[in-house]
Image (cartoon, rainbow, N blue to C red):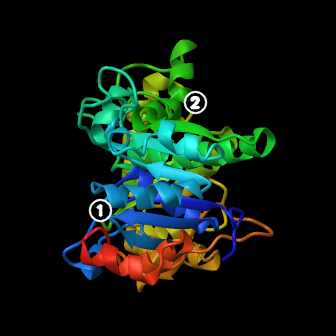
């Protein structure tokens, strides 16, 4: 194992969404992550459908049984980090809440991932990414003028605002622990993270540079030079030529007359300019425009499908995708000079149950008894 977090021991309560994404990032960075999973009817199918399961060791424990709860408590007592993504109160009812875990292991970083946060009127309410970003004010601005808001996949709430922010919080708490010697709770929520990602919009609104009318602003498809255009072959290209020098190169390459392109920042002319740009891009195919813009600084890029992104020469040159269990997946990020991260295989659910329990002092006979009684699998 390699990585900047080599030597850090993580126990993860298995689940879905942002918490497993956080655990995957920590595993990619070298942490030893042990996932506590529920019994699966078809372990191989569960493994294939596990989007973020790479790099773990896996144990299957029925935590609702007292003996199962004790096993998890023993694992956590020797860990650096404990991750859970349940609704507020679930782990407390199991006897695995922060008070119990930090009492047994004062150096523990206890990472919690929820949609709405641990407190507040919505804390116990069900939700998904689209609901969190809607309440954060992050969904309403996304879309074109005169059209409805467009859900941006599940990137903003679950993974950018959720799992990635939890990973940052865990790493920050580990750094602080090196000085204080004490662990703490890291409370991350998707709605908080999505709100944080909206910082630039809130600032622009406060200084009068952002309109609440969707699709009329610089970054929300309002500007003709920050937009997606359809090409002759019904594919798409993107342009983000905000700075004048890039805009000038964009206009010149498209062959648009100056009177149809300047001044760049006259908002009253943006709608008309977009029609001119759309007509220009419709004259060639996507790949023809890629060839025309090759080597030029015009903030231009083709809009690739996920499959095209995996195969693109620019990504292959940087090894931006790796093979994990026969699947092409994004490589670990960010990159490190001395301690490179690595994407390791997905385990079968329960693949490491015996070996992990042996590390907390369970004998082969005890492990067999636990298996026979259904506490582990």
- What residue would you read off at disc 1? 62
- Residue lying furthest bottom: 326
Q: Tell me what residue is drawn at x 65 percent, y 70 percent.
A: 341
Q: Which of 192 and 259 is in front in this view?
A: 192
The reply, left or right, for residue 258 in relation to residue 49 is right
> Mark 1: which secondary structure?
loop
Residue 240 visible, this angle: no
Residue 154, image x, y percentages: 35, 49
Q: Where is residue 355 in the image (x, y as percent from the top left)?
A: 49, 80
State the residue at coordinates (31%, 31%): 134
Q: Quadrant of the rendered structure where residue 139 is? A: top left
Residue named by callout 2: 263
What is the crowding at mark 2: few (fewer than 14 residues within 10 Å), some, or many (at least 20)? few
Position of residue 185 relative to residue 353, above or below, is above
| Element marked by disc 2 | loop
User: In the visual, does 162 lie left or right of 32?
Assistant: left
Q: Eyeballing the image, is 345 above or below 127?
A: below
Where's residue 214, x and y in %? 35, 27
Point out residue 273 in the picture as x, y percentages from the top left corner. Answer: 43, 37
Q: Residue at x 29, y 25 (%)?
A: 122
Q: Which circle's residue, 2 or 1, is located before the other in the chain?
A: 1
Nearer to the camera, 54 or 76: 76
Residue at figure coordinates x 59%, y 73% from the top left: 314
Return the residue nearer the eye: 193 or 359: 359
Relative vertical location of residue 131 with respect to residue 376 in this rendering, above or below: above
């Amino acid at each position: 194992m390699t990585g900047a977090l080599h030597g850090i021991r993580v126990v993860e309560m298995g689940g879905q969404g942002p918490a497993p994404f956080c655990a995957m990032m920590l595993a990619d960075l070298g942490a030893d992550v042990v996932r506590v999973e529920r019994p699966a009817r078809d372990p191989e199918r569960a493994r294939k459908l596990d989007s973020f399961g790479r790099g773990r060791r896996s144990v299957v424990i029925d935590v609702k049984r007292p003996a199962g709860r004790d096993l998890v408590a023993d694992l956590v007592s020797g860990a650096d980090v404990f991750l859970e993504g349940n609704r507020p109160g679930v782990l407390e009812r199991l006897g695995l809440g922060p008070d119990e875990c930090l009492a047994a292991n004062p150096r523990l970083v206890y990472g919690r991932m929820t949609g709405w946060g641990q407190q507040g009127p919505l804390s116990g309410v069900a939700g998904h990414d689209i609901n969190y970003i809607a309440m954060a004010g992050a969904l309403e601005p996304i879309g074109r003028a005169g059209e409805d808001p467009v859900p941006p996949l599940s990137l903003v709430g679950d993974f950018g605002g959720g799992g990635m922010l939890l990973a940052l919080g865990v790493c920050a708490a580990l750094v602080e622990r090196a000085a204080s010697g004490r662990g703490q709770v890291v409370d991350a929520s998707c709605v908080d993270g999505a709100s944080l990602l909206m910082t630039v919009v809130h600032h622009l609104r406060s200084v009068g540079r952002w309109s609440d009318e969707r699709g009329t602003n610089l970054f929300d498809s309002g500007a003709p030079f920050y937009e997606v255009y359809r090409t002759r072959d019904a594919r798409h290209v993107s342009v983000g030529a905000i700075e004048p020098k890039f805009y000038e190169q964009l206009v010149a390459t498209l062959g648009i007359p100056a009177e149809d392109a300047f001044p760049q920042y006259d908002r009253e002319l943006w709608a008309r300019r977009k029609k001119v740009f759309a007509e220009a891009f419709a004259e060639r195919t996507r790949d023809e425009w890629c060839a025309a813009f090759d080597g030029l600084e015009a903030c231009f890029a083709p809009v690739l499908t996920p499959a095209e992104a995996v195969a693109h020469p620019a990504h292959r040159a940087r090894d931006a995708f790796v093979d994990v269990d026969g699947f092409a997946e994004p490589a670990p990020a960010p990159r490190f000079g001395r301690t490179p991260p690595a994407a390791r295989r997905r385990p079968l659910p329960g693949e490491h149950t015996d070996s992990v329990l042996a590390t907390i002092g369970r004998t082969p006979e005890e492990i067999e008894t636990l298996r026979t009684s259904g506490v582990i699998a």
